[in-house]
Amino acid sequence: MKIPKGAIRWLSIGLGGALLFLSLWFLVSQLLYGWKQISARSWSFRWSAFACGIVAILLAFLCNTIIWHRAVLPYSAKRRPKLSEAVAVVNTSQLTKYLPGKVWSWVIQVLMTKSFGISAGKVLGLNLYLALSVTLQQAVFGGLLLTIRPGIMSMPLSWILFLVAVLSYFAFLFFGSFASKLLNEVLAKRGHANAVFPELSAELVVLIQLGSFTVVCLLGIGAVFGAVTLGVRLDVQVFLLVFLAMNVADMIGFVALVVPGGIGLREAILVLLFRGSFDESIALVLPILLRVMGVIVDALLGGFGLLLLGRMRKNLFSSSEPEALSTGGTR
């Protein structure tokens, strides 16, 4: 049976719209249900903690940019991209995260990195590898959350899911290069020899994993500062809950490809995870605060990226081909 042209696209849009609607409906209904508690609470907003949270999330995004910059260096056949150019490319393209689908930023990066001499296949492959590195580490944290947060599911099942997440991460870590080679062979047989996915060196793999772990930790720390902003008293249990829950919700929001930026879905997951551990008003307001913090960072880095892009557009979109540079990475 032949699938009608455009049917998958419209199905994805419809599914994404439905999931977005249900997530927002759940969040709004819960806010309305708990509005009396929210309005009756005497809120103490700690601006210093809010600023620290913004800085932590900002550092997480910048760390992701530095990893991207280091990852593309070995594959730049024409010229080495500067770190400032990486900031412009990555953070400008990330402004499209609130559009349906997750590939728009990657497609924009393909267009912007032509002057570096990096093939589209390598740009897409590197982005996919970076995204999977963070997502699978967050999955491990999610499994850990299940083992320390009672009531979500049975403890035996929680430990099974935790072990599955750990094994999946290490399988990705040790067999990722083999998967890249296999994919390249398949693409070559189909006549797409130029769309070659990168085969990463061991040094670069270690660097990406350490960088991804730093990103995950900074996101969690930013969320913890968000909780402190609302006056939540920290102890080890609260720290772990907020730290791990933020990464779990962020992972689910990313994996749900059809929901733009994970809007609504991430907040709904956080409400469910916080409920029972925090006061109802905190459980409802904290996820929204964390979204606001993320949007502020997106705006700051995206605006800065646009300023850099305006100054560097001649270099980034130049069709000239300077002498190729010899690099030590694997091509």
Image: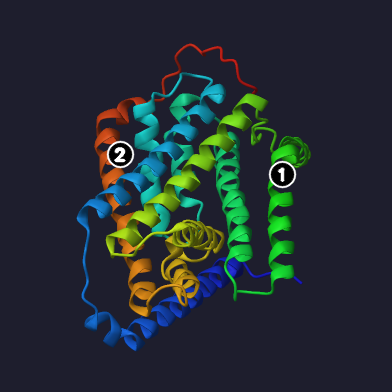
Which quadrant would the C terminus be assigned to in this image?
top right
Q: Residue 154, how many percent across, how many down?
A: 69, 74
Q: Residue 103, how many percent across, how many down?
A: 51, 51
Q: Nearer the viewer, mark 1 or mark 2?
A: 1
Report the side of 146 relative to 258 (left or right). right
Looking at this view, is 103 or 212 the one in front? 212
Residue 201 seen anywhere in this rendered image of the structure: no
Report the side of 89 relative to 201 (left or right). left
Which residue: 43% across, 46% down?
A: 218
Which image quarter: residue 275? bottom left
Q: Residue 83, how many percent across, how many down?
A: 38, 27
Alpha carbon distance from label 1 to label 2: 34 Å
Identify the amino acid type marked 2.
Answer: Gly
Q: Residue 236, how many percent across, how many down?
A: 47, 57
Which residue: 47% across, 70% down?
A: 265
Could you classify mark 2 by the number of other residues whose Cα lies within 10 Å: few (under 14), some (14-19), or many (20 or more)?
Answer: many
Q: Is label 2 in a helix, a strand or a loop?
A: helix
Identify the amino acid type marked 1.
Answer: Phe
Residue designated by label 1 = 170
| Pointer 1 with pointer 2, Cβ within 8 A | no
Looking at this view, is 123 or 165 the one in front? 165
From this view, report whether residue 277 is shown above or below residue 107: below
Looking at this view, is 245 or 14 the one in front? 245
Which residue: 59% across, 72% down?
A: 150
Mark identifier at residue 305 = 2
From this view, report whether residue 60 is shown above or below residue 258: above
